[in-house]
Image (cartoon, rainbow, N blue to C red):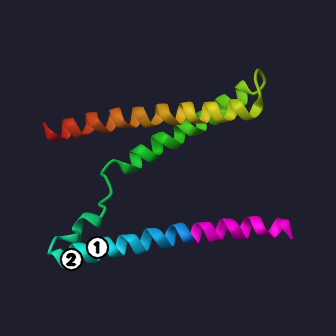
Amino acid sequence: MEDILVPIAFFLTLFAILYVYWTTRMKIRQSLIEKGADASLFKNSPSKYSLLKWGIFLVAVAIGVIAGYALSTVINEVAAFFTMIFLFGGVGLIVAHLITNSLSKKEKN
């Protein structure tokens, strides 16, 4: 009986979070329209470099998994994987930020 409660609670919590998100978003849109403001701020146009950012991030996470595997012989396996994934993932995001900034500056010039 207890084994079935965890997945049910997980999906109910997920549904509740999504329901609150969507209803709140709709209320904000309705209030903007009532006040005469433009609701176009909800249209998210993807960045030109979003695929580049995701690619760099996922490659860095993969390198983190490999480094975690190599480090797992020295320290605790769980700690090695988590620290290396987060470390290389963060480094990947910083590198992606620097690359996209330099590309956007070159594009403006």
The part of the chain drawn in magenta is: 1-15
Residue at 40% from the left image edge and 50% from the top image edge: 51
Magenta-drawn stretch contains 107 = no
Q: Where residue 33 is drawn, which disc sits there?
A: 2
The image quadrant where one finds the C terminus is: top left
- Report helix, strand or loop for mark 1: helix
Between 15 and 44, the one lying in front of the other is 15
The image quadrant where one finds the N terminus is: bottom right
Magenta-drawn stretch contains 3 = yes
Between 13 and 67, the one lying in front of the other is 13
Q: Position of residue 37 (x, y in %)?
A: 16, 71
Q: Where residue 12 is drawn, which disc sits there?
A: none
- Report helix, strand or loop for mark 2: helix
Tell me the chief SS of the magenta region: helix
Q: Quadrant of residue 63?
A: top right
Q: Which residue is mark 1?
A: 29
Q: Are marks 1 and 2 in contact (CB under 8 Å)?
A: yes
Which amino acid type corresponds to the residue marked 1 in the rendered image? Arg
Give the side of residue 14 with respect to residue 51, left or right. right
Residue at 24% from the left image edge and 64% from the top image edge: 41
Which amino acid type corresponds to the residue marked 2 in the rendered image? Ile
Q: Position of residue 85 (x, y in %)?
A: 60, 36
Q: Position of residue 9 (x, y in %)?
A: 69, 67
Q: Residue furthest top?
A: 74
